[in-house]
């Protein structure tokens, strides 16, 4: 199975060239966004009988120029359609974009270079060979997300590769919503209840990538114990993943991340605080959002609102809202690892990572998880 090729290397290891050993395919998708690749892999499983061959690769593993050259020689040069999703704009993968842009023009390939976040970079459209209107449509499939949109995206890319498939337009997925395992995104007002409620806050990216199985399993386990659940989705930005490149912590400036706190969620969180119950955050971005909201509220209770946060949490931070944390094992030199160290303590964090390495745990966004209390 060569649909999605990954390696076990860390970001520090990839200063050296790697060969993914991926065979050629008609459609090639490269992305820095884990949810893009896992979502497209799930969509391909549902559509594979009617699609041309598809190859997916993570740009984290193609940072070295020689790695780029090897991949282009083995995969890119043989593809009919190439789609690239970049976090941080052109500057994060300039060499690869320039090589593929030249190749696409020389060989008449369909090339789409798209931003991986809400901030557009006009240089990406200039590097593409598809018209701007088509780039906008392809980007909408990603930004709306969800399995059905990603299935439609693969069918649309297949048309550029010569297939004659019916394609639906991008379908709107709510920017903020509640969630039920058998229904998907729903109106949050359906969660209004006088019963005890646990807010499970998770990344919107998990919904967009059709990767809610862990959330579904947690919901089922809690429901089996008679606990009602409130679910909230959040945005995640480049600041979550970008490595820290400063000499002193007081120089850190993170990208802003957008969030929305509904009246239902605020009420559930306020009741938990009043009743002395522990709030468990599912993910480091959730910690940043809740602690930002707590700082903004001051001595008052939380209230419904939307906003942005660039809060940087490092050792010594006084946590006011979160009492426990579910999170994966993060990249070195990241603000996320700093946040975990602030919450668990540096020595406990290093001990946990040593154990994870010894036991060959999976790292990064879709790897193994740890519970920190």
Image: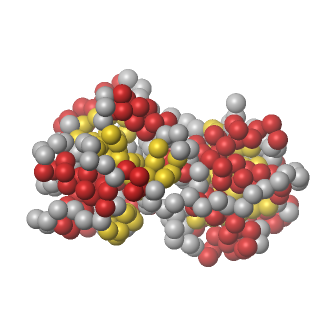
Left or right of 58: which side holds 337?
Answer: left
On-image quarter of the C terminus: top left
Depth order, front residue of 292/106:
292
* Residue 339 visible to an observer of this rendering: no
Left or right of 80: which side holds 315?
Answer: left
Q: Relative to residue 9, is residue 26 depicted above or below?
A: below
Q: Position of residue 206 (x, y in %)?
A: 49, 47
**Residue furthest top as drawn:** 359
Q: Position of residue 121 (x, y in %)?
A: 57, 73
Left or right of 30: which side holds 315?
Answer: left
Point 81% across, 47% down: residue: 26
Quarter-wise, where is residue 302 in the image?
Answer: bottom left
Point 74% across, 41% down: residue: 47
Q: Position of residue 102 (x, y in %)?
A: 76, 65
Point 42% across, 26% down: residue: 360
Q: Position of residue 36 (x, y in %)?
A: 58, 50
* Residue 149 visible to an observer of this rendering: yes
Point 83% across, 58% down: residue: 160
Q: Relative to residue 216, is residue 333 depicted above or below?
A: below
Depth order, front residue of 344/179:
179
Q: Relative to residue 62, is residue 256 depicted above or below?
A: below
On-image quarter of the N terminus: top right
């Amino acid at each position: 199975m060569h649909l999605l090729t990954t390696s076990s290397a860390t970001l520090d290891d990839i200063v050296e060239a790697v060969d993914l050993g991926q065979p050629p395919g008609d459609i090639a998708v490269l992305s820095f966004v884990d949810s893009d690749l896992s979502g497209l892999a799930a969509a391909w499983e549902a559509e594979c009988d009617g699609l041309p061959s598809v190859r997916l690769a993570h740009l984290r593993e193609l940072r070295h120029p020689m790695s780029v050259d090897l991949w282009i020689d083995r995969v890119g040069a043989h593809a009919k359609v190439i789609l690239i999703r970049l976090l941080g704009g052109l500057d994060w993968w300039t060499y690869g974009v320039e090589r593929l842009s030249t190749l696409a023009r020389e060989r008449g390939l369909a090339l789409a270079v798209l931003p991986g976040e809400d901030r557009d970079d006009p240089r990406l459209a200039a590097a593409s060979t598809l018209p701007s209107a088509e780039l906008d449509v392809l980007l909408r499939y990603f930004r709306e997300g969800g399995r059905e949109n990603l299935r439609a995206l693969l069918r649309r890319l297949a048309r550029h590769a010569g297939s004659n498939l019916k394609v639906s337009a991008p379908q709107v997925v709510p920017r903020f919503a509640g969630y039920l395992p058998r229904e998907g995104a729903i109106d949050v007002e359906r969660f209004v209840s006088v019963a005890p409620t646990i807010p499970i806050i998770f990344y919107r990216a998990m919904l967009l990538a059709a990767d809610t199985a862990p959330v579904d399993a947690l919901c089922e386990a809690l429901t089996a114990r008679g606990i009602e659940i409130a679910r909230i989705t959040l945005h995640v930005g480049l600041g979550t993943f970008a490595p820290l490149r400063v000499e002193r912590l007081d120089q850190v400036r993170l990208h802003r991340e957008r969030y929305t706190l509904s009246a239902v969620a605020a009420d559930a969180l306020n009741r938990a605080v009043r009743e002395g119950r522990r709030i468990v955050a599912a993910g480091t971005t959730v910690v940043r959002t809740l602690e930002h909201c707590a700082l903004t509220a001051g001595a008052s209770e939380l209230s419904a609102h939307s906003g942005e946060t660039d809060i940087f949490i490092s050792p010594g931070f006084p946590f006011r809202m979160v009492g426990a944390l579910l999170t994966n094992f993060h990249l070195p030199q990241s603000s996320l690892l700093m946040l975990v160290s602030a919450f668990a303590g540096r020595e406990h964090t290093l001990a946990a990572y040593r154990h994870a390495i010894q036991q060959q745990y999976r790292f990064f966004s879709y790897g193994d998880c740890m519970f920190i209390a």
